Amino acid sequence: EDKQLIIAIDGPASSGKSTVAKRIADQLNLIYVDSGAMYRTITYVAIKEHIDLTDEKKIVNALERVSIEFERTEEGQSVFCNNKEVTDDIRQNDVTNAVSIVAAHPLVREVLVDRQRKIAMKQNVIMDGRDIGTVVLPDASVKIFLVASVDERAERRYKENRQKGIKSDLTKLKQEISERDYKDSTRKVSPLRKADDAFEIDTTALSIDEVAEQIKKNIFEKYPKLRK
Ligand code: CDP
Ligand code: CDP
């Protein structure tokens, strides 16, 4: 059967969504769509253009002039905004700490959800974010919800930063992650929430490989032919 394969992965910051999604995308030959990178890109543009982040209309206006494109690379995935690479820019702290404000605007979400669905219509995809299983792709064939303790998630970000040569404060990282969790799960429109039919994995004590294996087991149960 050639039914389209659509996999939704949701969960809070640093639960391991993108790392695991990229790995599965490579192994099963799927397109990986990083919905968070889209919210980050418009946040980056708004900051750069000195737009008041609470001004929803102005942000939507800017978003309509912005194209967001992904390109697979050996190390991961590059992000382009109007054909200019922004892969690293959108991971900077100022963007990370502002993105939940921008992502709470209903009209911003409307535009981005529409773009996300358009990408998913054409091919086999694995998409990660906060509302993929609940709102963006409610008919996804496999839904996964990843969680991990705040301590573990802050530790992961800390190590990731250290590897990139960025010094960070663990206590502050923990605070920032908790604050983003709170904003993302309490906003009115499409809050971070596990879909009723999603499979939850607590990754606190699991390696990336172990998480990927569990997800693949889920996928193969529905699509035995994919097992090689
Ligand atoms: O990688 P990390 O977990 O830090 O976050 P991300 O996936 O890059 O998402 C950044 C932010 O974008 C989140 O904290 C949310 O505020 C927002 N977001 C969202 O609202 N809906 C999504 N589907 C994806 C991200
Ligand atoms: O996309 P999300 O923000 O959910 O998380 P991520 O960027 O994929 O993962 C954050 C960091 O945690 C990365 O440096 C991963 O290598 C690491 N990680 C881990 O140590 N163990 C896991 N089971 C998953 C991720």
Image: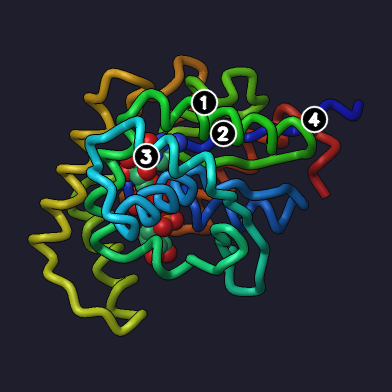
Q: Earlier in the sequence, mark 1 or mark 2?
A: 2
The residue that label 3 is drawn on is 59
What kind of residue is marked 1? Gly
The residue that label 1 is drawn on is 133
Alpha carbon distance from label 1 to label 4: 16 Å
> For mark 2, does the 10 Å Cα neighbourhood hold few (<14), some (14 to 19), or many (20 or more) residues?
many
> For mark 4, does the 10 Å Cα neighbourhood hold few (<14), some (14 to 19), or many (20 or more) residues?
some
Q: Is residue 187 left or right of residue 222?
A: left
Q: Earlier in the sequence, mark 2 or mark 3?
A: 2
Q: Is mark 2 within 8 Å of ligand 1?
A: no
Against 182, residue 28 (above or below) is: below
Give the residue at x 56% y 67%.
Answer: 84
Q: Earlier in the sequence, mark 4 or mark 3?
A: 4
Q: Secondary structure at mark 1?
A: helix
Which label sits in the foreground, 2 or 3? 3
What kind of residue is marked 2? Ala
> For mark 3, does the 10 Å Cα neighbourhood hold few (<14), some (14 to 19), or many (20 or more) residues?
many
The N terminus: image quadrant? top right
